[in-house]
Amino acid sequence: METKIIVAGIGPGARDYLLPAALAAIENARYLVGGQRALNDYSHDKQVTQVIDRDIQKTLDFIAEALNHHDVVVMVSGDPGFHSFLTRLRAVFGAQKLVVIPGISSLQVAFARLALPWQDAAFLSLHGHDESAAALAYRPGRTIGLLLDGKMHAAEAAKKLQACGWPGTAFVGVCANLSYPDEQIWRGTLQEALQVPAQAMCVMVVAG
Ligand SMILES: C[S@@+](CC[C@H](N)C(=O)[O-])C[C@H]1O[C@@H](n2cnc3c(N)ncnc32)[C@H](O)[C@@H]1O
């Protein structure tokens, strides 16, 4: 039987926000791949595990070898379809080799925390990634959800958005450590966001 790579979205992190289908795949996995935090939270000692770190080739080699024996479950944060390892897995192994289990994106949780509808929002990433001035440009009524990180944190993103024409009065929500006990939700203006302290695991919503 052909083996598959099962890419399971684990949501923002807490077990309450993990779909039962993803949990079943993770618990039944013989070969389990994921970030260190996900492996700490979800792996058990009957599994062969591989951490996803800076050495991506090592992880890809582990998956290729494991596929000779069994399916491999790869855990990714949030939803696999939004800025995750899925892009690389698809490029290397091809879509036919993949089964994707969706997860709740960090940005879905952020919009929920802020009680903001997201049907008209744009979703972009400044996490290890840049976006063009055109993509970030201000237009009245526009809403953008942005992935950030410890380097491109809220204050840096606020500077970038002001340079793209966003007014200092625009609404900003900054959501850090979503679903974890130390979750923080900050609401204010773009001008005030210039003073928000850096957080490693963080997203921002801006609405004009
Ligand atoms: C590699 S991207 C993965 C995005 C993911 N696929 C998603 O749908 O949320 C990592 C970024 O997701 C965001 N993120 C993931 N989990 C988060 C959480 N629990 N709280 C806040 N932001 C989170 C942060 O912006 C982080 O830098």
Image (tube, grey):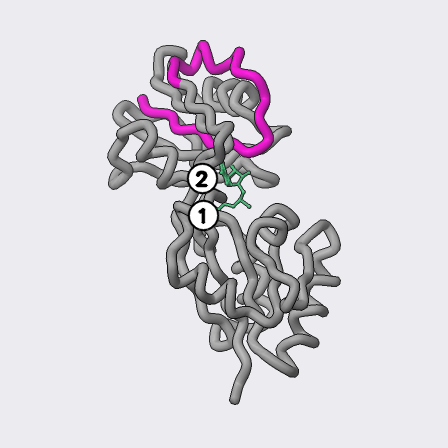
Q: In which quarter of the image is the C terminus?
A: top left
Badge 2 marks a residue whose secondary structure is: strand
Residue 124 circle label: 2
Please state which amino acid type lies under the numbered disc 1. Arg
Span highlighted in magenta in the image: 187-208
x and y percentages locating residue 172 in the rendered image: 39, 20
Tell which of 16 and 163 is nearer to you. Answer: 16
Q: Considering only vertical position in the picture, is 30 above or below 53?
A: below
Which residue lies at the image location 56% right of the left edge and 38% below the top edge? 127
**Mark 2 / mark 1, whichever is N-terminal:** 1
Tell which of 137 and 43 is nearer to you. Answer: 43
Which residue lies at the image location 52% right of the left edge and 76% below the top edge? 4
Residue 167 circle label: none
Q: Distance between the residues labelled 2 and 1?
A: 26 Å
Q: Mark 1 points at which residue?
A: 15
x and y percentages locating residue 124 in the rendered image: 45, 39
Q: Does the magenta stretch include residue 70?
A: no
x and y percentages locating residue 51 in the rendered image: 68, 56
Residue 178: tell me if it is visible. Answer: yes
Tell which of 53 and 153 is nearer to you. Answer: 53
Tell me which corner region of the image, top left, top right, bottom left or bottom right, holds residue 109.
top left
Badge 1 marks a residue whose secondary structure is: helix
Q: Considering only vertical position in the picture, is 134 above or below 92?
A: above
